[in-house]
Image: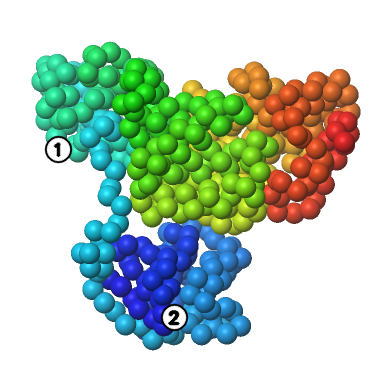
Amino acid sequence: MRFCFENKVLDSDLRELTCDGAAVPLQPQVFDLLLYLVTQRARVVSKDDLISQIWSDRIVSDSALNSRINAARKAVGDDGAIQRLIKTIPRKGFRFVGEVREEMAASAARAEAKPAPLRMTDRPAIAVLAFGNMSGDPAQDYFGDGISEDILTALSKQRWFLVIARNSSFTYRGRAVDIRQIAEELGVRYIVEGSVRKADNRVRITAQLNDAVSARHIWAERYDRELVDVFSVQDEITNAIAAAIEPQIHAAENFRSHRKPPASLDAWDLLMRALSHFWRVTRQDHGAARALLERAVAIDPNYGQALSVLAVNDMFGVHLGWAELAAVAPAAEAAALASVRCDHEDAWAHAALGSVCFSTRRLADALSEFEQALALNPNFSLAQSYYALALSYAGRAKDSFEAAQRTILLSPRDPSLAIYHGIAAYARFTERQYDEAIALAREAIRHRGDLTGAYRVLAVSAGMTGDGTLAEMALTELRRTQPGISLHWIATQLPWANDGDREHYLEGFRRAGLR
């Protein structure tokens, strides 16, 4: 449906706002709010209505809600003083008061002008088979089915690969069929299978990920648990398996792409190669990832996942001092918004937009985008870690530490585990728990000896405790990983919400010896 008012068109199918035919950049949550106000224009919409419809009943501050209202007004050329289109009704809520004409969906010609969707033929597809019941009791089939279905649902939220529906993959239950045959019949490359063995109040669950084409095991794990709470155990194991599978598939796809000759690489292959560099988190790999992602987007400008990783990679580079914010932020925001338009239910897209908002000091918007990413995919460790970091800079250190701990528990074999420990360390520093911050920073460095953020926290924490030797070592390593580090860079480039936290961090660096 198209809603026409003044010289603007709000298209619910294309999720686009245009003014005199030109697209108006709009964050997805602001689009949703504007669309809701327009469709409900016959009545006053209360704050509770907006929180229920736009934020899915999550706790939202008045400032976050008002920032979205102001953004919607700005997008349609209105403001809080004039209130020509979006009117505030005191103590009641908001109402869209502009004259609106409704039209049918965009024409076929307009639809044809959209970039063609990314072809899925070269993308990985995965099937989750029904987990076998090894207990000898048919009544226990339900537990294995529940695990399998939950894994299937969790993987479906990750949007990187096609997940075969239950009705197809469960047809092989109880049949001795070679996984190569299953792969051929279902058109998949990867198969998840497993078993459940229940005895008394204990359960053992095994799971493995197979590359059906090469008939090799990529990943396998065993989980032994007490069945104090069946559903709690089921949720815990499902989350652990789903969190482990995505990076394993990325690693396998990266290996496969490196076996292809350079001339035959498509956008997916380039993305997989870029991710392998992205997760290494070094200045050189940051640049290599960016070059590969730009090639992927050049092949397919509508490739949402490449656009989202490009935006995250750029913003991570800014936070670590490898890129200038002013130079990369506009293009990164454009890429993140394009990614959301490609698939507004992709958690990576919202994480990308959140990362841009974080680096450009829009912390309320950043937290909202990370929360939306986690609502779409609760097992998304990168969004969880970025959320934890944004919470610290927003002045919510306790919440930040808890979020970082959830990330570590969620993905204990994650390639970015060092970063998660570093974020937890910064949260502890913010709470003035310097000894614990030092211990966590050392743990991060144990996993990765060249992690810029961990050396920052180690330096400031050592500075605050008066440990000159440790502070000198940390500063030496920090200058190696971030040669341009300075008090001026810290004061101007990192996005604190309040001056007290910034001054605390600067004081730690002064005491450590940074000038």
- Any part of residue 207 in sight: no
Q: Which residue is mark 1?
A: 167
Q: Residue 52 versus residue 18: which sits nearer the camera?
A: 18
Question: Residue shown at 59%/46% (left/top)?
Answer: 328
**Of the residues tagged 2 and 1, which is closer to the observer?**
2
Q: Residue 339 versus residue 62: which sits nearer the camera?
A: 339
- Any part of residue 66 in sight: yes
Query: What x and y, as percent, mark residue 206?
Result: 32, 19
Q: Residue 189 versus residue 460: which sits nearer the camera?
A: 189
Q: Residue 89 versus residue 162: which sits nearer the camera?
A: 162
Where residue 178 sits, quadrant-wise, is: top left
Task: Give the number of callouts.
Answer: 2
Question: Residue shown at 62%/56% (left/top)?
Answer: 362
Q: Which residue is mark 2?
A: 96
Name the amino acid, label 2: Phe
Query: What x and y, as percent, mark residue 291?
Result: 49, 34
Question: Residue shown at 22%/18% (left/top)?
Answer: 213
Q: Residues within 10 Å of mark 1 (few under 14, many from 20)?
A: few
Does dot 2 land on a helix, a strand or a loop? strand
- Seen in the picture, residue 322 relative to 245 is either above or below; the reply is below
Does dot 1 land on a helix, a strand or a loop? helix
